Amino acid sequence: MIIYISCPAGNEDKTENAIAYTRLVYKMGHTPITPQIYFDRFADLEEDGVKEIRKYLISMCDEMWTFDDEDEYMAFDISTAVLSGIRVYEGRDKLDCRNKNRQ
């Protein structure tokens, strides 16, 4: 399954969190898409061109998983997913389900 990961953006700590969430989703056997990991390095996530790319990437995904407290960056992603018919889940709930299934 292709999973779009949306979590707060803006500083190195938040990017490290995004990398950690991406790694967990990957280890679950999914294909994670986490634009902030790479766009944060060279572009403003709120630029019109970057927003269009994010919309496109969201449309390619099966689900969106969100992590941490919602910020403006995430609000755009979530509303785009909802309008596109992409299911949005709290990522920690999905990770908890996996851990419960192992027990």
Image: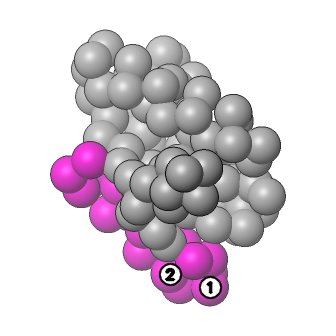
Q: Are marks 1 and 2 in contact (CB under 8 Å)?
A: yes
Neighbour tally class for label 2: few under 14, some 14-19, many 20 plus, Cα within 10 Å = few
In the rendered image of this protein, does residue 8 appear above or below residue 103?
A: above
Front residue of this view, candidates 57 and 50: 57
Q: Residue at x 53, y 84 (%)?
A: 83
Q: Residue at x 32, y 63 (%)?
A: 75
* Whether residue 8 can be seen here: yes
* Magenta-colored stretch includes residue 95: no
Label 1 amino acid? Answer: Gly
In the picture, the disc for residue 82 is: 2
Write the start and end of the magenta stretch as one range.
68-87
- Give the structural element (helix, strand or loop) at label 2: helix
Front residue of this view, candidates 74 and 87: 87
Neighbour tally class for label 1: few under 14, some 14-19, many 20 plus, Cα within 10 Å = few
Q: Position of residue 71 (x, y in %)?
A: 22, 52
Q: Position of residue 6 (x, y in %)?
A: 45, 50
Q: Residue at x 57, y 77 (%)?
A: 87
* Whether residue 31 can be seen here: no
Using residue 81 as the reference point, say whether residue 85 is left or right of it. Answer: right
Please name the residue that numbered disc 1 is placed on: 85
Q: Position of residue 79 (x, y in %)?
A: 42, 74
Using residue 100 as the reference point, say whether residue 85 is left or right of it. Answer: right
User: The N terminus appears in which quarter of the rendering?
Assistant: bottom right
Label 2 amino acid? Answer: Val
Q: Residue furthest front?
A: 103
